[in-house]
Amino acid sequence: MAMLDDIIPGAEFRRSPIERRAPAGVAGGMDWDDVRVFLAVARHGSLRAAGRALGLSQPTIGRRLTAFETTFGGPTLFDRLPEGLRLNAAGEQLVPAAESVEHAALMLERRRAAASPELCGTVRVSVGEWAAGFLSRCLSGPGTPLPCGITLELVESRQTANLARREADLAVRHHPPESGDLYIAKVGTFGCAVYRRLGSKSDAWVTYTEEQAHYSTARWMQQRIDETAGTVALRASNVTMQLAAVRAGTGRGVLPCFVGDEDPLLERLTPPMPEIAAHYSVIVHRDLRRAVCVRTVIDWIKAVFAEQRDTLAGSR
């Protein structure tokens, strides 16, 4: 019997133990899950990173990769280097065929999910920091409830998950992808303003790190700093750290209005600034758009954005 973490969520074409047995004269049978492991290692460059992408342990990834290589007579498909694993010529030749298998399997999985009439299960949503905080707090309260049969799984990251590969069922982002077979619908806007701890006299800024200087909010703050010969008290890579610093009185910073306006420790120093407002969209692969659970979550997201429109805009 396979170990629990040997099973890749969403994998198709899973065979019985009898079907997995190799025919006479063949070194080993092929498991389609091993194809996905091979591609994950090729894309991420290490067993550990591939394991994180697929939700499997590093030993399981190593075991499945060995099984996949054995299927092709035993030659290794990767060069084992100090910095990780790199495809060699033999491995490179297999990538197009492996991706074709993956594409077909994922398409069938998406369509199977879309055909299910069940209003229950987990819906995985790719979000950024602000959307994660907003949607989390909307799960309880007087607004539209999420049906009790659905579990919402919020995955916070800076990059939108690959929806074609089912890294998430849908996404809520303010920079939707520019390509792909995707359904994209605008849902609302997060207003932003400058906040400081109530009673604080600090005019220093709490802003992003230099690696994030391309963010529109970071550019806006840097322009204010340059214009006023201002100082920077802290550079932090996420809003959670920036909020903690502003609340402590370290300095002033830009925060979403739905966070800053409701914090009794903070005072707003500016009106909402339209030039750095974040316009959010819900994004889903077209194959999954009509899946009952996914459609229900999309409708819920649209409803809570509409109900909280004034709070999000900072007009209250």
Image: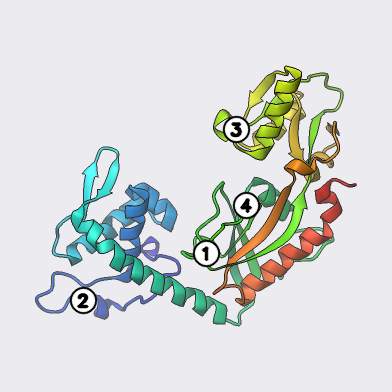
Secondary structure under the numbered disc 1 in the rendered image: loop
Q: Amino acid at mark 1?
A: Gly
Q: Earlier in the sequence, mark 4 or mark 3?
A: 4
Query: What separation in Å lies between label 2 and label 4 (alpha carbons)?
Result: 47 Å
Task: Give neighbour class at mark 2: few <14, some 14-19, many 20+ (Cα, 10 Å).
Answer: some
Residue placed under numbered mark 3 in the picture: 213
Measured in 3D between alpha carbons, the distance from the residue under mark 1 to the one under mark 4, in whole angstroms, is 14 Å
- Quarter of the image where one finds residue 208: top right
Residue type at numbered disc 4: His
Q: Would you say the residues marked 3 and 1 are in contact, meaning their CB atoms lie under 8 Å apart? A: no
The answer to whether residue 265 is left or right of residue 241 is: right
Bin the neighbour count of mark 3 within 10 Å (Cα to Cα): few under 14, some 14-19, many 20 and up.
some
**Image coordinates for residue 80, horizontal then vertical, percent:** 22, 45
Pointers 1 and 4 in contact (C-beta within 8 Å): no
> In front here: 79 or 53?
79
> Is the image coloured rainbow, by chain, by secondary structure, or in one colour?
rainbow
Residue 155 in view here: yes
Residue type at numbered disc 2: Arg
Q: Residue at x 33, y 59 (%)?
A: 39
The crowding category of the residue bearing disc 4, from other C-alpha atoms within 10 Å (few below 14, some 14 to 19, many at least 20), is few
Q: CA distance from mark 1 to mark 2?
A: 38 Å
Which residue is the site of mark 1? 180
Q: Which residue is mark 2?
A: 21
